[in-house]
Image: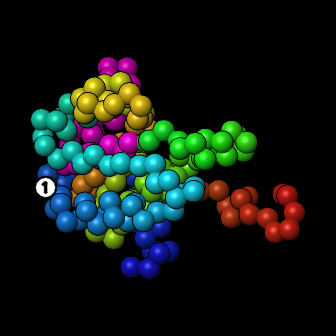
Amino acid sequence: MNFSDLAKKRQSVRSYKDMPVEREKIERCIEAARIAPSAHNVQPWKFIVIDDEELKNKVAKETFNSIVSFNKFTLKAPVLIVVITEKPKLVTKIAGAIKKTQFNLVDIGIAVEHFCLQAVEENLGTCILGWFFKKGVKKALNIPQNEDVDIVIALGYPKTDTIREKRRKNIDEIRAYNKYF
């Protein structure tokens, strides 16, 4: 599959087949994330793969509550990937302060998209979650205080092969040549 097809096929998947994901496929997704570029090559990421049912349910329950229930689908996802964001190294912290940019979060976004595009190549579906209860996830996995969790990825075989029509801005709304819009 070429890159354009991968990008068009990648979508948030919230309904999965009840079947395990082979660890070889997960490893290839993590390898794709591992080789992602990062500011000053600091690679501020770690990936915790959760495929143990009991632990997965414990972590999944930290992605929703009685008021905010839109992530309940995580209970049915065969795998959850908890993405650890390491604190910025001195060089990226200084550069980030000067540029007013959190480069570690930019880097995590790039790595996670690499992961998700590889998942599409493996016929897997993903959903990137930014809404969850960090303290609960960190506690469930004994993640040290000096590291953070900014993203959880639900992973599995999509229940359907249907690719939804993407509602995106027109290209003329987001692109300009040689001048501001």
161 in relation to 79, above or below: below
Q: Would residue 153 be counted in the magenta stretch?
A: no
Q: Would residue 82 be counted in the magenta stretch?
A: yes
For mark 1, does the 10 Å Cα neighbourhood hold few (<14), some (14 to 19), or many (20 or more) residues?
A: few
Identify the residue at image location x=57%, y=55%: 39
Viewer-side residue, 1 vs 162: 1
Viewer-side residue, 89 vs 166: 89
Quarter of image, res 73: top left
Viewer-side residue, 104 vs 130: 104
Identify the residue at image location x=86%, y=68%: 178
Q: Is residue 161 visible?
A: no
Would residue 101 be found to the left or right of residue 9 on screen? Answer: right
Residue 10 image point, x, y percent: 42, 62
The quadrant in which the N terminus is found is: bottom left
104 in relation to 38, above or below: above
Quarter of image, res 141: top left
26 in relation to 64, above or below: below
The quadrant in which the C terminus is found is: bottom right
In the picture of the structure, the residue carrying the numbered disc 1 is: 19
Would residue 40 be found to the left or right of residue 128 on screen? Answer: right
Residue 93 image point, x, y percent: 61, 41
**Magenta stretch in the rendered image:** 61-84
Residue 117 image point, x, y percent: 40, 64
Q: Is residue 128 visible?
A: yes
